[in-house]
Image (cartoon, coloured by chain):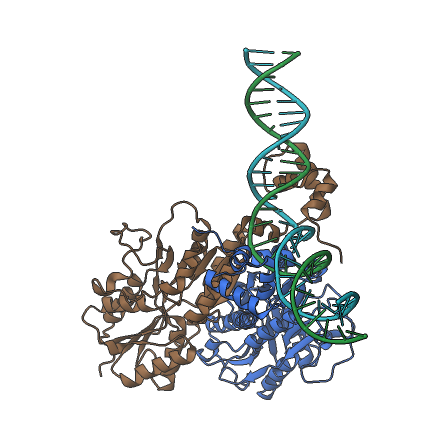
Chain colours: A brown, B blue, C cyan, D green
Amino acid sequence: MSRRVTIKDVAEAAGVGVATVSRVLSGGSASPATRERVLAVAAQLDYRPSALGRNLRQRRTGAMGLLVPDLTDTFYGQLSEGVLACARAAGEPVVLGSTGGDPEQEAELIGMLLEQSVDRLIAVPSGDAETWSPALRAGMTVVFADRLPTEPAAEEEDGAARAADDLLLLDGLPPAPRPRPLDVPSVVADDRAGIRTAVRYLRGLGHRRVAFLGGPGHDRRAAAFREAVGEPVDEELVVFGTGSRDSAYAAASGLFQSRPDVSAVIAGGNVLGEAAVLAARELDLRVPRDVSLIMYDDVPWAELCSPPLTVIAQPGRDMGYRAAELVLRSGGRRPRGVVLPTELIVRGSCGPRRSP
Amino acid sequence: MSRRVTIKDVAEAAGVGVATVSRVLSGGSASPATRERVLAVAAQLDYRPSALGRNLRQRRTGAMGLLVPDLTDTFYGQLSEGVLACARAAGEPVVLGSTGGDPEQEAELIGMLLEQSVDRLIAVPSGDAETWSPALRAGMTVVFADRLPTEPAAEEEDGAARAADDLLLLDGLPPAPRPRPLDVPSVVADDRAGIRTAVRYLRGLGHRRVAFLGGPGHDRRAAAFREAVGEPVDEELVVFGTGSRDSAYAAASGLFQSRPDVSAVIAGGNVLGEAAVLAARELDLRVPRDVSLIMYDDVPWAELCSPPLTVIAQPGRDMGYRAAELVLRSGGRRPRGVVLPTELIVRGSCGPRRSP
DNA sequence: AAGCATGATGGAATCGTTTCCATGAGCAGG
DNA sequence: CCTGCTCATGGAAACGATTCCATCATGCTT
């Protein structure tokens, strides 16, 4: 097989120095005549610059990293598509990793990216600030999407509303700046508004016992839930799975069995929603007759369900795209956080509370 | 910020040459004393070898490429998870691209991977042999998953059964070897068996007019369908969408409207299945009373549908994992093609044909 | 004891690009 | 006509690893 065509070959064939070829190809200054000749020769030789040489010289990979918990989760599929779209537009490759929601795997993947000199990363974080400090210390430009790292046991200041507070609302006034543990931009959904709308909607249907079914990384949503419910919430009504489908199912099933008085459930993610539907069916609870259900993520199959699922839609694709934009525009000032709006899409999985 | 620790730093700190450090770190020979000292110094300095230098020297990226049509499609999410799992086990990064099912984008992404010197690629191909020849000419190790590239208008030899023929059946005798246009290993599902089982099952329920609803890359499945049906099949009953959800919906809706006599449909992928359910509902066709439905891919939400969908399950995750294994074991002899078994999972979307 | 084999070791070349710097040509102003 | 400036240009260094090869020490054989 023939050797790869290098810049040197082009230089020789065009009768110029390698420096000139490099300049022409990367838009530096050169006389029109030379430029044309070099371009012609390069095209004729089918020369493709090797990213390897460039990367080494510039001490960085062009690539951006992408870390998601699970590609099987449609929402992360959407988010990834957004990132990929933006990356393609920018001509950058994307190095993908799936953490399985496990901080340890996440840390390992971060190490791998570091070794690859990937210096831009979009992540749906699973670990805490400690997991992320190596990346930040190494000077990586990180943007979090969908979630923020769990805060390392910070003393509560004023309760639930805290975590969501210090983000620049997309179309609101910037709230008083308060230092965050990690100074990393993020792109997340407006969980407070989303959950509030959902809770109000359920309240309007007469539901008093509303439960929240969450997974890893849904702390902010749970907090928003507590806040929206207002009165001190029965903590038995906030249950968490660990991320796997099995554990989500167990959590949902456990909730339904231990608390038959809940008449409505908000699921913090589509995997949880799926589990809730399955668990309800298994326990002969009819949706929405016996229990109303609202789930996060407007995945395509929400409409196929029986009944079609009422959802809190968050723009997964946009989220990925904007996160990628943010990570690309690493120079200059950029907003600390972007909050994307959610939308309650009412379908058929919620009904009025039946009087017991 | 402090400079990156290089192999030279380690060498100096340990009082040895860089060559020795390199040898120690990559398992070459060295005296126990030196080895220990180097290791200690490296650990203390928190030295991480840069992939950049290594890659340039070895003229290849460690990374493996992964090209799928659409991450929003749960099946490709599963497949990707499989690839990622294997890659992680091998300690290799994965560069991801989403082609949108568009040969042009695919070609572009191949070019990008070539530029990155990614020399191992797992792909769900969208283009034909011509799209793929640059990659192969450049010496890339390619493994196709889920599909084979569309054959460039080869003259038919013996009709439908052809494409599926020259693959080494996983647990069968190797059929007579016949040259294929592209000599690329592949991992695909046993579509012939899968479709045959599905068709027989529907036949058993009394259905005579069975239609096939396909998308891009489902040619082999369509061929298997024609073969399974046996008698020369009404070509109006084999309809194709172009890959988008809209086009899938249009195809399904068109089929139902133009041919009210079809009593059962086999969808070649979960996006098509979804479209079929939606279209049927829109046209007030009840599943399975008015029309029976079998769809490819046992995605989690198949069970949530109303009624739960009978599916042809193919092991997406395994498919990805095995493809990755194949691409890693690029040295030595490896099977030309691996065919993974499918399984008909009967749920509730098929019923007996109603006498008209 | 001399010669030879073996194994550890370090210097230097190499990979393909970008970029710094020196050089030389061309041109305008004095 | 000379000086100084601009601009195109090419040589060479740098990036950080691997790997070839020469060197040297050690131990064993004859």
Residue A7 appears anywhere in the view: yes
Q: Residue furthest bottom?
A: B204
Which is nearer the eye, A223 or A331?
Answer: A331
Residue B249 appears anywhere in the view: no
Whether A14 is drawn above or below B311: the answer is above
Q: Residue at x 45, y 78 (%)?
A: B305
Image mark count: 0
* Residue B16 point in image, percent of width and height: 57, 59
Which is nearer the eye, A349 or A54?
Answer: A54
Q: Residue furthest left?
A: A231
Snapshot quadrant of residue B243: bottom right
Q: Is residue A356 left or right of residue A255?
A: left
* Residue B104 point in image, percent of width and height: 62, 56
Q: Residue at x 50, y 82 (%)?
A: B349
* Residue B126 point in image, percent of width and height: 63, 63
Q: Is residue A281 left or right of residue B346?
A: left
* Residue A334 point in image, percent of width and height: 38, 48
Whether C21 is drawn above or below B351: the answer is above
Whether B74 is drawn above or below D6: the answer is below
Which is nearer the eye, A213 or A200?
Answer: A213
Q: Is residue A51 left or right of residue B278?
A: right
Q: Is residue A136 left or right of residue B145?
A: left
Snapshot quadrant of residue B250: bottom right
Snapshot quadrant of residue A127: bottom left
Quarter of the image for the C terminus of chain B: give it: bottom right
